[in-house]
Image (tube, helix red, strand yellow):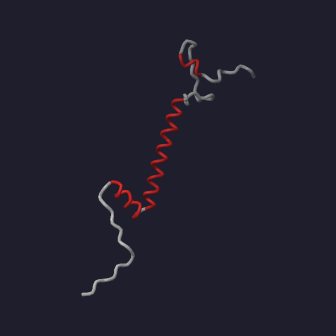
């Protein structure tokens, strides 16, 4: 019985988590690359949301509703642009 010749090369991967990642990059590089970019995008979105919340991002100059704040309210000192009465 004649065995067929090997064409190309055989790639063997181990059973660890790193080897699973390497095998995924070998077999489906498009999916692994897109998954990596999605993880990076989620990380950047979380950083952006935390910066937005930390810098009082909800304090907009033009709002769709009026909100009356008393002068002794701690949020009163956060107002950047009080109502202008110059016309």
Q: How many marks?
A: 0
Taking the view exactly as shown, the residue that stands out farthest to the right is 87
Q: Is residue 87 left or right of residue 65?
A: right
Q: Nearer the viewer, residue 70 or 27?
A: 27
Q: Nearer the viewer, residue 69 or 32?
A: 32
Residue at x 44% of width, y 61% of height: 29
Taking the view exactly as shown, the residue that stands out farthest to the bottom is 1
Q: Position of residue 75 (x, y in %)?
A: 54, 19
Residue at x 41% of width, y 60% of height: 25
Tell me: residue 73, above or below residue 52: above
Q: Position of residue 69 (x, y in %)?
A: 56, 17
Q: Nearer the viewer, residue 42 or 26?
A: 26
Q: Quadrant of the N terminus?
A: bottom left
Tell me: residue 64, above or below residue 26: above
Q: Position of residue 8 (x, y in %)?
A: 39, 76
Which of the 4 quarters of the picture holds residue 81?
top right
Q: Quadrant of the C terminus?
A: top right
Residue at x 45% of width, y 48% of height: 39
Taking the view exactly as shown, the residue that stands out farthest to the left is 1
Q: Is residue 45 left or right of residue 83?
A: left
């Amino acid at each position: 019985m004649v065995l067929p010749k090997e064409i190309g090369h055989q790639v063997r991967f181990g059973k660890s988590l790193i080897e699973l990642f390497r095998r995924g990059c070998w077999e489906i590089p498009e999916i692994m690359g897109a998954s990596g970019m999605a993880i990076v995008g989620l990380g950047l979105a979380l950083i952006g949301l935390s910066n937005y919340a930390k810098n009082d991002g909800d304090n907009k100059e033009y709002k769709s509703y009026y909100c009356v704040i008393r002068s002794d309210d701690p949020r009163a000192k956060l107002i950047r642009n009080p109502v202008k009465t110059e016309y």
